[in-house]
Image (tube, rainbow, N blue to C red):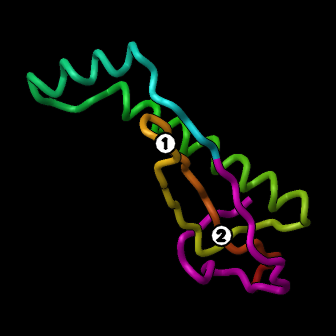
């Protein structure tokens, strides 16, 4: 599966546009991570606990988007974007979306 944030893939031509594909996950903070993050906030530095949580969420959303595209016959996704939104205090959604296409060599 070819993934890109651009409209085109160099060396490929789009032969079919399948349409919007997406994948999402909703994650809640963990009390243990919150305690570590609050301590880190006092002394400064990167909040590794949240960095890891967001990275895992991003990968899960991407995997779900790719599964959606594959199930619809795509071999590439163009114009990939991410969006986040707070669902409730302590929980957020991460959404990956793009346009599923079929590409061939030029």
In the image, residue 7 above or below residue 30:
below
Q: Position of residue 28 (x, y in %)?
A: 51, 31
Seen from this angle, which residue lies furthest left? Answer: 43
Mark 1 crowd level (few <14, some 14–19, many ≥20, 10 Å Cα): few
| Left or right for 25, reference 40 | right
Alpha carbon distance from label 1 to label 2:
26 Å
Q: Quadrant of the N terminus?
A: bottom right
Which one is nearer the viewer's eye here, 75 or 38?
38
Q: Quadrant of residue 39?
A: top left
Image: magenta residue range: 1-24
**Residue with the mark numbered 1:** 88
Mark 2 crowd level (few <14, some 14–19, many ≥20, 10 Å Cα): many
**Residue with the mark numbered 2:** 98
In the image, residue 32 above or below residue 34:
above
Check if residue 16 falls in the magenta segment.
yes
| Left or right for 46, reference 26 | left
Q: Quadrant of residue 70?
A: bottom right
Check if residue 100 falls in the magenta segment.
no
Lower sequence index among marks 1 and 2: 1
- Mark number, residue 17: none
Mark 2 secondary-structure assignment: strand
Mark 1 secondary-structure assignment: strand
Q: Quadrant of residue 30?
A: top left
The answer to whether the residues at label 1 and label 2 have Cβ atoms under 8 Å apart is no
Q: Position of residue 80 (x, y in %)?
A: 58, 68
In the image, residue 100 above or below residue 38:
below
Q: Quadrant of the C terminus?
A: bottom right
Magenta highlight: main SS: strand
């Amino acid at each position: 599966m070819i993934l890109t944030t651009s409209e085109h893939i160099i060396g490929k031509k789009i032969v079919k546009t399948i349409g919007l594909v997406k994948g999402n996950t909703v994650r809640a903070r963990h009390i243990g991570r919150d305690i570590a993050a609050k301590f880190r906030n006092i002394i400064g530095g990167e909040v590794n606990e949240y960095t890891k949580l967001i990275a895992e969420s991003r990968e899960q959303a991407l995997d779900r988007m790719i599964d959606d595209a594959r199930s619809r016959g795509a071999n590439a996704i163009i114009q990939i974007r991410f969006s986040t939104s707070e669902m409730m205090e302590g929980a957020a959604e991460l959404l990956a979306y793009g346009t599923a296409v079929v590409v061939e060599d030029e």
